[in-house]
Image (cartoon, helix red, strand yellow):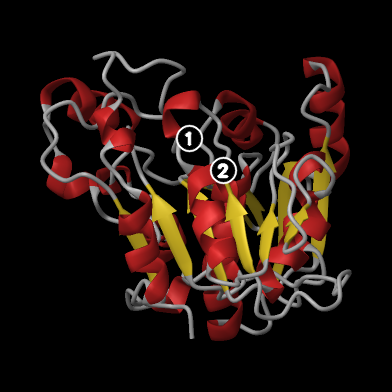
Amino acid sequence: MKILVVRFSSLGDVILTTGVIKYLKTAYPDLTVDVLTYTHFSGVFFKNPYINKVLQIDKKSGFRKYLNFIQKNINDYDHIFDLHSKLSSIILKFFTSAGYHKYKKDSLKRRLFVKYGKFGGSLQEHVIQRYFKSFQKVFDMDTPSDEDLRPVIYPNNLYENLSGTVTVHPFASKKTKEWPFFTELIDELVKRGEKVNIIGDNFFEYNHANVNNFSGKTDLQEMFDIIKQSRSLITTDSGPMHVGIAGETPVVAIFGPTTKEFGFYPVFSNCSVLEIDGLYCRPCHVHGSDRCPEKHFRCMKEISVGMVLEKFDLYKG
């Protein structure tokens, strides 16, 4: 049997497909698994032994080019598993005779939870389990544990001498998801004698002999390698958080406007979520926003450097 797994973006969501694919391929070793994603995220599947082929298309491709791509490439699958559930993935079912299976996204429930606090319990099921349920429609498998579905990456060993370092990722897709005290945290880590790596798409101003400032300088594979080699990762709710999970690097994740109920939190072993429980305004947005709606930003400002270090000390080895 030959199947296609579809997830175009974003980094964390694409990474989370890998554990499900690994579990499926282990149960059905003769299965051929291809994936379809945006070119920018194709590196997630680099050297992945459970995947036959990575189909990739540029996010900026026009609709006509995308349709041509579909007609040329999506024509010999027995089943398509849509783990994105957006228009560009849903239309695949109209261009193939393959069985089409879509994961339950629960977008409306998430919005209602933000606005009215409804459905919190049902939403807290991790997205990897929701991904997995899409495959249970075709494959006879018992529901695995979350740990069984832990994502995987295969870095390229591009850096040397990073073993034992602590990696910090201070950025996020939205400003309200960025903790404002990363500079002070790095100060404290340096005082302790830790060697620190700073990563991120943007540049983070920090200079010290014990700090490798990789911010704004690495591509996807380089970032994977830095995190994989690190002793610990301290990060926002962001794509690199999921990289740490997949690389089995101990993770301390700082959550502000987003919460566990959205199903994307680090549920796996050697991972911690640091958040202010019981705050009346959390969550304030499904994906975070650029400004605090309440104008106090308590969800982040009330998380101290000491609180982060306390979590970090659980995994410092």
Q: Is residue 110 above or below residue 233?
A: above
Q: Give the residue furthest to the front.
A: 191
Q: Is residue 99 visible?
A: no
Q: Is residue 246 above or below residue 179?
A: below
Which of the two residues, 230 or 289, is positioned nearer the viewer here? 230
Residue corresponding to mark 1? 178
Earlier residue among tags 1 and 2:
2
Q: Is residue 112 above or below residue 128?
A: above
Kind of residue indicated by mark 2: Pro
Q: Is residue 131 left or right of residue 200?
A: left
Q: Is residue 81 above or below residue 289?
A: below
Q: Give the image location of residue 199, x and y in percent.
A: 70, 50
Residue corresponding to mark 2? 170
State the image quarter where residue 189 is shown.
bottom right
Quadrant in which the N terminus is drawn:
bottom right
Which of the two residues, 70 or 221, is positioned nearer the viewer here? 221
Q: Give the image location of residue 87, x and y in percent.
A: 57, 24
Q: CA distance from mark 1 to mark 2?
A: 6 Å
Residue at 24% across / 14% down in the picture?
294
Q: State the SS at label 2.
A: loop
Which of the two residues, 212 or 173, is positioned nearer the viewer here? 212
